[in-house]
């Protein structure tokens, strides 16, 4: 690295450290008004999904203020669990002045990286690793403060997270009404946009909360039936999904997600979409809250659905947990355990070996 590059790197890190100060976030949030959510019961819980517009912001206080405004509106509508979308951290990219300038030009994400490093020395992974520490400070401070002040279970969406070896993960967070982190869930299946920079998780958590068991597979994870089956066999009754998808407004493509999976493995589900045209991404909705067909009626799976695919919205629905448990008990699955023992996991291992030999 040249002296010029070292100086630039030091300056950027100093700027990001200053603009991501947790103290600034806490100071601003301490001056706001809060209405505390009621605690969920074992029988019922009210869930809100935030269809959030992604726009670049130039400091952490503005990011936290946006979260506050959306969360306040959700709690005022009775929400006890609130779900934000995948890639909810993207506004934090605005802390990098060159990124804001490139966004105004309307270039694509790949084009932005090329302009930042025309010699090919920078990648999307490199940009993400640069800003990851700031994302962590801003995202975690904002979520913990707001969950505690509003008294809600908060899934603030997904954010960048690194491990000790520097691998990047697209990770969902869940906070409790005391502001404590309940757990994180790294995305298990990358999209084509993520495969070059994202490391995949290899464990699916199910969290036992006072009112229900919850899992949070992320976006593409619902394309594979195995994810939902594992979660529900381990007792998950609510699947808090979030997504960033350019095809969500095309029903035949969007239907590959949670609303199909919960017909096979009974649970309530959410899908919180972000909406944005930054860098040509064209992320869209509509977001929804869903139930298995037959739980509420034979013709309805959506308990709530955003009215638009490209506007910021908040949707809310009450989940009847007692009814879900009765429904599952009345519709038991017939399992052929001998069949599964015969072929699994050997069939996956055989497929993995074939796929590896082709690369």
Image (cartoon, rainbow, N blue to C red):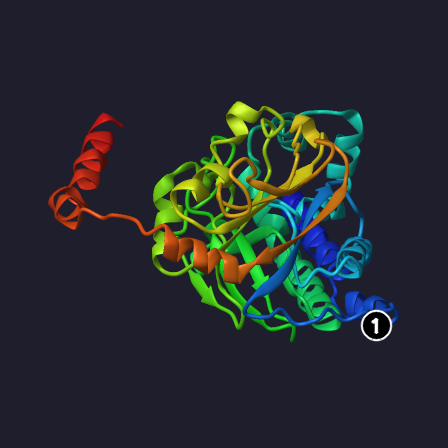
Residue 194 shown left or right of residue 11 in the figure: left
The percent position of residue 304, horizontal first and vertical second, equals: 66, 43
Q: Is residue 200 left or right of residue 8?
A: left
Q: Is residue 275 above or below residue 239?
A: above
**Residue at the spot of label 1:** 30
Secondary structure found at label 1 = helix
Spot occupied by residue 11 in the image (x, y as percentages of width and height): 72, 52
The furthest residue to the bottom: 178
Residue located 75% across and 25% down the image: 106
Q: Residue at x 73, y 38 (%)?
A: 99
Name the image quarter holding residue 91. top right
Q: Quadrant of residue 222?
A: top left
Which x, y percent locates residue 352? Answer: 23, 37
Quadrant including the N terminus: top right
Position of residue 301 in the picture relative to residue 196 (left or right): right
Neighbourhood count class around disc 1 (C-alpha, 10 Å): few under 14, some 14–19, many 20 upward: few
Q: Is residue 163 visible?
A: no
């Amino acid at each position: 690295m040249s002296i010029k590059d070292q100086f630039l790197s030091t300056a950027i890190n100093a700027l990001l450290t200053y603009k991501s100060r947790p103290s600034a976030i806490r100071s601003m949030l301490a001056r706001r008004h809060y209405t505390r959510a009621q605690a969920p019961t074992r029988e019922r819980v009210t869930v809100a999904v935030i269809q959030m517009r992604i726009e670049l912001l130039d400091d952490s206080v503005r990011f936290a203020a946006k979260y506050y405004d959306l969360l306040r509106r959700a709690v005022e509508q009775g929400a006890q669990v609130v779900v934000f979308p995948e890639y909810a951290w993207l506004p934090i990219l605005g802390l990098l002045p060159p990124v804001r300038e490139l966004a105004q030009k309307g270039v694509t994400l790949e084009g932005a990286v090329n302009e930042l490093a025309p010699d090919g020395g920078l990648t999307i992974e490199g940009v993400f690793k640069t800003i990851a520490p700031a994302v962590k400070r801003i995202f975690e401070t904002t979520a913990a403060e707001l969950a505690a002040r509003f008294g809600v279970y908060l899934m603030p969406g997904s954010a960048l997270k690194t491990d000790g070896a520097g691998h990047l993960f697209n990770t969902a967070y869940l906070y409790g009404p005391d502001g404590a982190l309940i757990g994180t869930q790294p995305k298990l299946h990358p999209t084509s946009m993520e495969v070059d920079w994202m490391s995949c998780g290899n464990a699916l958590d199910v969290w036992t909360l006072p009112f229900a068991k919850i899992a949070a597979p992320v976006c593409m994870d619902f394309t594979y039936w195995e994810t939902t089956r594992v979660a529900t066999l381990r007792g998950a009754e609510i699947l808090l999904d979030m997504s960033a998808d350019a095809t969500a407004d095309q029903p035949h493509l969007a239907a590959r997600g949670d609303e199909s999976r919960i017909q096979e493995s009974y649970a309530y589900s959410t899908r919180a979409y972000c909406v944005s045209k930054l860098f040509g991404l064209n992320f869209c909705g509509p977001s929804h809250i869903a139930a298995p067909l037959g739980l509420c009626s034979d013709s309805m799976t959506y308990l709530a659905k955003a009215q638009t695919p490209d506007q910021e919205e908040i949707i809310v629905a009450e989940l009847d947990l007692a009814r879900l448990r009765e429904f599952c008990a009345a519709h038991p699955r017939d399992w052929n355990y001998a069949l599964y023992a015969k072929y699994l996991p050997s069939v996956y291992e055989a497929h993995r070996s074939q796929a590896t030999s082709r690369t």
